[in-house]
Amino acid sequence: MSKIMKRNIYIAIALLLIIFVRYIPAPTGMNQSGMAVIGIFLGSLLLWLTVAIDWPSILCIFSIGLIPEIGFKSIYSSSYGNETFIFLMTTFLCTHVLAETPFLKRCALYFITSSVAKKGPWAFIISFLSAIICIGSFVSPTVLFVLFLPILEKINELLGLKKGDKIGQLLMIGLAFAVSVSSGMTPIAHVFSIMAMGFYTTATGNVISYADYMAFAIPVGIICMTLLVLVFRFVMNPDMSKIKNVDVSFMKDELKPMDKREKTVIGIFILIVCLWIFPSILKNFIPVISKIGKMGTAMPPILGVVLYSIITFDGKPLLNFPEGMRKGVQWSSLVMCAGTLGIGVAMTNSKIGLTKYLISELNPILQGISPMLLILFLITWACIQTNLSSNMVTVTVVTTVAIPLIQATNGTVSCPAVVSIIGMMSAYAFATPPAMPHIAMAIGSGWVDTGTILKYGLLFMVISIATSIIIGYPIAAALM
């Protein structure tokens, strides 16, 4: 069967689900429009998994707009007009400005040319991975991988490595896995955690703060990377003799001294990050700062876009807006985000009653289930699915199911904690080529093959699940 034929079949099935599931009689306790929402969800999910993530999201929004209890004006404001959509678009623009400067490369070289990195082979490996984790905390994964790939190629050339060498495999796996982990450690410029937090807010009306999210996600990320180094040391166990005297200090000579333009870009970005983090940390000590937090998460990057657009050097603004919108904004991800926000609003709409029905049906079933077993199931599901399919589909599906399941436990399981971990785990994608674009790029580089990525990816999946449950959940539950 041809690719076009398969595509047409998937589209036909999806349209049948979207159009006709609404006519199946709804079970007692659910509004008939609930069946329409289920049909739209299933049809959109099929298209997201098999065809594309962009135009099916627009179809999803259109279909939800036809539901009488919601309507088009409501779904527009809940999707494209949602704070999460504006937040992501403006954050992409701000990180684009930062990525256009030498600052990120400067940071990377600082780590791998430091005195610590020169103390031995494993010190160099740890410094290399630390650079990725630190920079990746506020840069999108694809940009991060593209930034480090030429640096890694230069290191491999300097060491005289050949494709197939274990050290080359180690460095490429380390780069790919660290990029994924870093994108789950903060919500800054990272879609998946923001989507999970947005779904939780839509369903409950409560907000998960950046500070609370990072308070558990950063320790989990650091512990996971520490355990990955131990896997490299005792499982992969490569001959490190070639890397004993590595010195890449000469690469710093390629960088010009930091100028006023770069310093201004960095200063504004630091301001944006501070406006995200400090209001939730300092609100009990400096009450007036809580007013900033009430302005929402989209306010800081909006301010950043304005400042970057106003301030000029050599007659040119820091942000070339048309270029930034074209090159810096990940539009496919953004459009899907709007679609998933729309389906989240539809599924939690009180007039439709789908969530209320699910809670009433699931409550008797979940009463006899161990809370820890439920947590294990949801986190494992998120980790496995994100390594096999789209991360955005993962966070959408798992959180959509998880929220009513957890609400049915009547507080036994912390809903914001589990939802946050699902958002984080959706970024922990590293085992297969479809997991994330940079995993496919790592395999395509020739330094590591699909089988090796799968082998260590599966092992790292087990490590991340265990760390998230043992370390991440207790911290998140205590804070949220």
Image: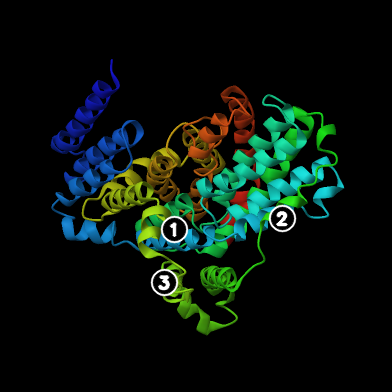
Asked if labels 3 and 1 touch by Cβ distance under 8 angstroms, the answer is no
Q: Secondary structure at mark 3?
A: helix
Instruction: Report the Cα–Cα distance between label 2 and label 3.
Output: 30 Å
Camera-nearest residue between 246 and 346: 246
- Within 10 Å of disc 1 (Cα), the crowding (few <14, some 14-19, many 20+) is many
- Residue at the extreme front: 314
Amino acid on which the number 1 mark rests in the picture: Phe
Instruction: Point out the tag, 1 or 2, that comes first from the N-terminus.
Output: 1
Label 1 or label 2, whichever lies nearer to me, is: 2
Instruction: Report the Cα–Cα distance between label 1 and label 2.
Output: 27 Å
Instruction: Point out the tag, 2 or 3, that comes first from the N-terminus.
Output: 2
**In x, y percent, where is residue 149?**
60, 42
What is the quadrant of the N terminus in the image? Answer: top left
Q: Which residue is mark 2?
A: 252
Amino acid on which the number 3 mark rests in the picture: Ser
Amino acid on which the number 2 mark rests in the picture: Lys
Q: Is residue 275 above or below residue 223?
A: below
Please indicate, yes or no, whether residue 273 appears anywhere in the rendered image: yes
Camera-nearest residue between 290 and 53: 53
Q: Which residue is mark 3?
A: 309
Q: Which residue is mark 1?
A: 92
Which residue is found at the position 42% from the left and 38% from the top? 390
Examine the image and state in which quarter residue 477 appears: bottom right
Say how many tags the image has: 3
Instruction: Report the Cα–Cα distance between label 1 and label 3.
Output: 14 Å
**In x, y percent, where is residue 148?**
61, 46
Q: Secondary structure at mark 2?
A: helix
The circle drawn on residue 82 is none
364 sits to left or right of 76? right
Q: Is residue 82 above or below residue 28?
A: below
263 sits to left or right of 348? right
Label 2 or label 3, whichever lies nearer to me, is: 2
